[in-house]
Image (spheres, coloured by chain):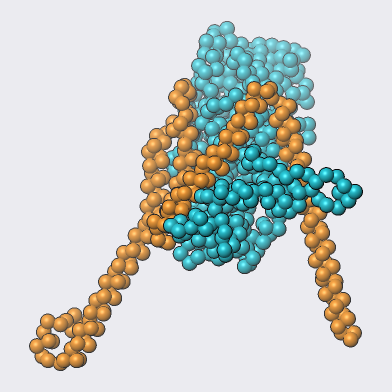
Chain colours: A orange, B cyan
């Protein structure tokens, strides 16, 4: 009886520890959230007091348009692309395609300003490179790196399949030879040494 | 969502305190969406997303990497801000001389790295964008609003920062101030997000079965909403909570994300890391392309100083208790000091230069400028935020702070600040004033 009591006590204690741990975690989360709200408020206050109204309207536009471009354009487009790609591809090609989209898409986004930048900056040290060439090189490397393993596995599999087919043909021929051991059959059929 | 009519609040009764209003009850507001079910098409459909990779573990792992990138960008951004507008508590380090080169290079590199990370993170959690009902309760609404602030701020910071690296400002606000304040808003929203999601993040870190529970809209067996839309779309609409054998694996997804970060970093970071210059295929700057082998941010023509800088009457004025003026020949005749110091710009590029000139400290001592006082530096530039700048005494007394006359063995080119420019260790490039006309306490 005393044993069960102590087990109960221990269970009670661990339960208490867990509950206390949960409470500590909750307090920490509330503190973190409070700090977040305070910092967010500080930023909003700075934003609202440091600029005049026309600038603020521009800031607001850029904030909202960025959000809309992602949530209402990029996300649905990616949804459709993924849905279509899922139907059209097998698992291996799908993986390569996903890698190309993610890596290539990131690189294109990072390089995009170089292409959209309106001419007129008379400073020749800003964007001095041939970015189309750079992007082509990076794109080629990314696509090659993503597709090369696919190609290699494809080749390996085809070779394996051919070898298997040859082995099967050989086994078949041996079996047929055993079934009808006539000397005339031995000629055209390649032996095991061939 | 604007057309949404909230259920009317219950009239206050004696026991009103006990009955929570509809908008505060879990699922209370959600019921209002029942007659909007016809909107449940496309990504809003029940089970529109396969659970693969839209799970807590993937979201936590990519989110952690993104959080690290944002934290790095934020801290280095605040350092950059403090170096330019120092608060009294902020120490101004002059050693190592590449201090700002490192922090600002890290700032831009972490921002670049955050672009693929943000894309991958948003992709992982984007079924949540199409969750149904879109609004469940007041708390749920506040949480979604905080996510909207976080995403808007994150996109804003990355886009404006990226455009700044190519000196493109297609907006009507002050870039530096706005980039700074929106960073605080974004980090605040990020902390709120971490506080809300802490249990999910913890579950995601633990490699357990619980982590594979989808964050996608829960899939119900008898998908009532999906019935009309079933049929040919069924193949893509299949929902299953476990990862499927022929889906892209989490490891492949994380590897691709890591490779995307690597690709973006390797092709741009050469603008501040000299050893990676040869793979610098997409960076807006090349650290050895420019007059005298160093880039510039503003040409003399852009600053409108060509005539003034070449004018034979140019004198350096040193202002203090005993002011004086020097011609370029007189400056050149003073004891010269050489130092290899980086010029490091807020846009992220940086390059080492071998500078030769007169120690600023010696010039100020001759005018009897007190050692502890900050000085002003006036440029020939007519107007602009950096035509008059302040240099704190930490820099003015440093033996490596020069009024440089030569760069890499030649007289300064006009675009590098002829006849004389400031170069100080560990300072942002915009404060390394070119075309100096006066220095001292004014």
Q: Nearer the viewer, residue B427 or B212?
A: B212
Q: Which residue does the image show at 75% across and 35% down from the upper left?
A: A42
Q: Is residue B440 left or right of residue A124?
A: right
- The residue sitting at the top extreme is B313
Residue B406, position in %: x, y? 54, 23
Q: Nearer the viewer, residue B233 or B67?
A: B233
Residue B114, position in %: x, y? 57, 45
Residue B370, position in %: x, y? 78, 21
- The residue sitting at the left extreme is A184
Q: Nearer the viewer, residue B162 or A169?
A: A169
Residue B125, position in %: x, y? 59, 52
Q: Is residue B406 left or right of residue A145?
A: right
* Quadrant for the N terminus of chain B in the image: top right
Vertical position of residue B139 compared to residue A23: above or below: above
- The tally of labels here is 0
Q: Quadrant of residue A182?
A: bottom left
Vertical position of residue A118 compared to residue B283: above or below: above
Q: Quadrant of residue B190?
A: top right
Q: Is residue B95 left or right of residue A72?
A: right
Vertical position of residue B228 compared to residue A39: above or below: below
* Quadrant for the C terminus of chain B in the image: top right
Q: Which residue does the image show at 86% across and 83% down from the upper left?
A: A4
Q: Is residue B417 visible?
A: yes
Q: Is residue B63 left or right of residue A156?
A: right
Q: Which residue does the image show at 59% across and 50% down from the upper left?
A: B37
Q: Which residue does the image show at 53% across and 23% down from the upper left?
A: B298
Q: Is residue B97 visible?
A: no
């Amino acid at each position: 009886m005393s044993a069960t009591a102590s087990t109960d006590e221990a269970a009670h204690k661990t339960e208490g520890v867990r509950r206390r741990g949960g409470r500590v975690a909750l307090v920490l989360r509330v503190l973190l959230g409070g700090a977040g709200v305070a910092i967010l408020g500080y930023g909003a206050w700075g934003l609202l007091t440091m600029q005049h109204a026309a600038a603020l309207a521009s800031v607001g536009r850029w904030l909202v348009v960025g959000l809309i471009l992602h949530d209402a354009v990029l996300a649905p487009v990616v949804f459709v692309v993924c849905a279509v790609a899922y139907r059209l591809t097998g698992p291996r090609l799908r993986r390569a395609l996903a890698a190309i989209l993610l890596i290539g898409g990131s690189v294109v986004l990072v390089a995009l300003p170089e292409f959209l930048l309106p001419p007129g900056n008379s400073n020749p040290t800003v964007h001095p490179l041939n970015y189309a060439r750079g992007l082509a090189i990076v794109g080629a490397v990314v696509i090659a790196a993503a597709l090369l393993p696919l190609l290699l596995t494809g080749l390996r599999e085809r070779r394996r399949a051919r070898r298997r087919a040859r082995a099967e043909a050989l086994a078949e021929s041996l079996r047929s030879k055993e079934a009808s051991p006539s000397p005339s059959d031995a000629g055209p059929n390649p032996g095991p040494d061939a | 969502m604007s057309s949404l009519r909230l259920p009317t609040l219950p009239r206050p009764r004696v026991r009103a305190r006990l009955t929570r209003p509809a908008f505060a009850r879990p699922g209370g507001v959600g019921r209002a969406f029942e007659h909007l079910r016809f909107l449940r098409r496309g990504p809003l459909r029940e089970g529109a997303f396969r659970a693969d990779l839209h799970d807590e573990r993937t979201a936590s792992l990519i989110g952690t990497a993104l959080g690290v990138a944002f934290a790095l960008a934020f801290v280095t951004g605040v350092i950059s801000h403090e170096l330019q507008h120092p608060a009294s508590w902020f120490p101004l380090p002059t050693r190592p001389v590449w201090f700002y080169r490192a922090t600002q290079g890290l700032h831009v590199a972490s921002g670049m790295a955050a672009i693929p990370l943000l894309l991958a993170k948003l992709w992982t959690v984007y079924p949540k964008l199409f969750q149904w009902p879109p609004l469940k309760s007041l708390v749920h609404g506040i949480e979604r609003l905080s996510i909207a602030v976080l995403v808007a701020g994150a996109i804003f910071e990355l886009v404006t920062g990226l455009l700044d690296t190519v000196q493109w400002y297609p907006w009507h606000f002050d870039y530096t101030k706005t980039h700074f304040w929106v960073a605080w808003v974004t980090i605040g929203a990020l902390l709120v997000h971490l506080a809300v999601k802490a249990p999910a993040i913890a579950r995601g870190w633990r490699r357990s079965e619980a982590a594979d529970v989808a964050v996608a809209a829960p899939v119900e067996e008898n998908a009532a909403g999906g019935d009309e839309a079933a049929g040919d779309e069924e193949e893509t609409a299949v929902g299953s909570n476990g990862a499927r054998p022929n889906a892209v694996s989490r490891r492949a997804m994380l590897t691709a994300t890591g490779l995307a970060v690597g690709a973006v970093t390797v092709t741009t970071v050469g603008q501040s890391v000299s050893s990676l210059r040869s793979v610098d295929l997409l960076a807006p700057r090349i650290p050895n392309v420019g007059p005298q082998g160093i880039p510039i941010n503003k040409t003399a023509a852009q600053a409108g100083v060509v005539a003034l800088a070449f004018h034979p009457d140019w004198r350096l004025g040193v202002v203090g208790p005993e002011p004086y003026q020097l011609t370029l020949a007189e400056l050149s005749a003073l004891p010269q000091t050489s130092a290899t110091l980086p010029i490091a710009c807020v846009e992220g590029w940086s390059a080492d230069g071998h500078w030769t000139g007169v120690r600023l400290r010696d010039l100020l001592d001759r005018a009897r400028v007190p050692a502890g006082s900050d000085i002003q530096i006036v440029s020939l530039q007519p107007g602009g935020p950096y035509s008059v700048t302040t240099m704190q005494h930490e820099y003015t007394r440093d033996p490596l702070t020069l009024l440089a006359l030569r760069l890499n063995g030649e007289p300064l080119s006009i675009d590098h600040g002829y006849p004389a420019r400031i170069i100080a260790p560990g300072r942002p490039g915009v404060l390394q004033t070119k075309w100096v006309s006066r220095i001292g306490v004014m």
